[in-house]
Amino acid sequence: MAMKTTYLVQTFVLKRKRLVPGDRQASPTSSGAMKRAEAMAARMPGTAALQIVADDETGELESATILGQYGEVPDDFAESLQAA
């Protein structure tokens, strides 16, 4: 059981006056994900840099951690990660 860590930038867009998840982009490092999320927040309503740890073989999620949030992020975003 090999665990793999992935760093993602999750964008948020406004649809019908609600914040919803937009595109996701992978980043090679945690600092790279945070810098990219911060830069993208200038063009988007909000972004979040995430660290995802999952089993490389089964894809089963071990943990999801928010490294940084920029701009507007849905209030329930942190809870939705724990439920995944």
Image (cartoon, grey):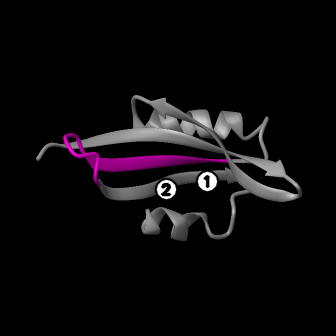
In depth, the one of 6 and 83 nearer the eye is: 83
Q: Mark 1 points at which residue?
A: 69
**Other residues around mark 2 within 10 Å, as few (<14) / some (14–19) / many (≥20):** some
Query: Chief secondary structure of the magenta span?
Result: strand
Q: Residue at position x 22%, y 40% from top?
A: 56
User: Which amino acid is tagged 1?
Assistant: Gln
- Give the residue furthest to the right: 17
Inspect the magenta stretch and tell me whether residue 23 lies in it: no
- Relative to 76, does residue 16 appear above or below in the rendering? above
Q: Where is residue 35 in the image (x, y as percent from the top left)?
A: 57, 35
Which quarter of the picture shows residue 78?
A: bottom right
x and y percentages locating residue 16 in the rendered image: 88, 55
Q: Residue drawn 68% across and 34% down?
A: 39
- For residue 30, which quarter of the picture? top left
Inspect the image, locate mark 2, and give the three-letter code of the amino acid beneath it: Ile
Residue at left 77%, top 40%?
A: 44
- Give SS at disc 1: strand
User: How many neighbours does mark 1 have within 10 angstroms: few (below 14), some (14-19), or many (20 or more)?
Assistant: some
Q: Where, by quadrant of the figure, is residue 28 drawn? A: top left
Q: Give the labeled residue for mark 2.
A: 66
Say which of 74 and 30 sits in front.
74
> What stretch of residues is rendered in magenta?
47-60
Badge 2 element: strand
Cα distance between the residues tagged 1 and 2: 7 Å
CB within 8 Å, label 1 to label 2: yes
